[in-house]
Amino acid sequence: MYTKALYDHEALALQIIRQKNHAWDLEKGISWSTGVDANRYLLPIDSEAIAFPGASAEQRLAISQLLGLIVNSTIAELEDMIHKLKHSCWTEILRSYPVGPEIWELGELFFEEEIKHSHAFHRYNLAFCEGTGIDKKDLDLILPKAYGSLFLKAVTQNAKFGGHSFWWIVAAVEEVSISLYKNLSPFKTQMDPLYHEVHLRHMEEESRHHNYAFLMLQILKERNHSLSDFFYSKTDLIFGQMFCSGWVIAELNKVFDSKKLKHKHPFFETIASCENLFKQLGPKELASRLFVSAPYISLMINGKNHKKTIKMAEQQNIFSFPFPDPIQVPTHTEVIPAFTKSVQRKTGKG
């Protein structure tokens, strides 16, 4: 895998040059001035509208847009978490386990790019609010937040006591980001152009640096000497999978708080109107959809979608959670001009 370059100083040096030469600027590298096209889907969705069977055209558009914002916020929060844990989960490790200067420099580039990506996704969500007249504070009430969560506390404690779940989570997040773009890229001409551009830029840098988590995991494997090192090495992945998936599922429940906001904006009113559709699903069917077939959500919470991470775990005889086999379902988009007109009429925009 990517770890074969761990001691190839020439290959690592070339990667540093490649990342620096192709890096994009947050202000100049994305066409923020184009704004958001509220007629367009943000993410293609399946015929069952994720978990809202029977949704109308207006509801499907709102679900696609909310899901796109949730995906943005989820990745932004995780990448911000990565940056927050830089010292305890990276600096202290490399100080304890001496490595070449290239690993240090690649790490600095990695963390710089991750926090830039977090800012880019949050900025898109702000642009969506500005383009539709939604109060950003209201939207934030139903979007995922990692700060203060049990998930963040668990990963922090794991690192404090000598575990390295952090790097397994990072490896999975990197895979999700790249797979996400592969799923939406066939629809790039039908999506909101700015949403596509943000995810394209994100994928480009993720593709250039996503080997870094695997390099760190290889370093940690080679330095495992004590009984506690052995224990954590066997359980870190499953620990990270359980807490990461649990956090995503818990944060998705915030969607139903939209009913508290339905009088503030027609977007929330439309989302709130979908709750009865969701209630048609029984617990077993809902769980199956979320873990097996729901586009994007299954990608985030079902560890079997993270094939490179699982492959490395198998090579190292690491335990992973027995997730069900995922199923990829067809997705599509629609353009609903009437929705934007309705929003503009109710909010006074346009």
Image (cartoon, rainbow, N blue to C red):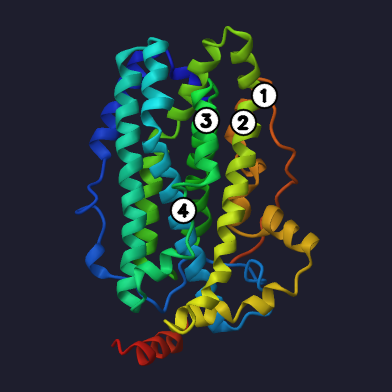
Q: Residue at x 36, y 22 (%)?
A: 91
**Residues under labels 4 and 1: Cα distance?**
29 Å
Q: Is residue 91 above or below residue 139?
A: above
First of labels 4, 1 by sequence position: 4
**Residue indicated by mark 1:** 318
Q: Residue at x 25, y 63 (%)?
A: 32
The answer to whether the residue labelled 2 contacts the one labelled 1, judged by CB atoms less than 8 Å apart, is yes
Q: Is residue 126 above or below residue 146?
A: below
**Residue indicated by mark 2:** 237
**Residues under labels 3 and 2: Cα distance?**
15 Å
Instruction: Give the number of the disc on residue 157.
Output: 3
The amino acid sitting under disc 3 is: Gln
Which quadrant, please, contains the C terminus? Answer: bottom left
Q: At numbered mark 4, what does the secondary structure look like: helix, strand or loop?
A: loop
Residue 157: percent from left, percent from top: 52, 30
Of circles 1 and 3, which is in front? 3
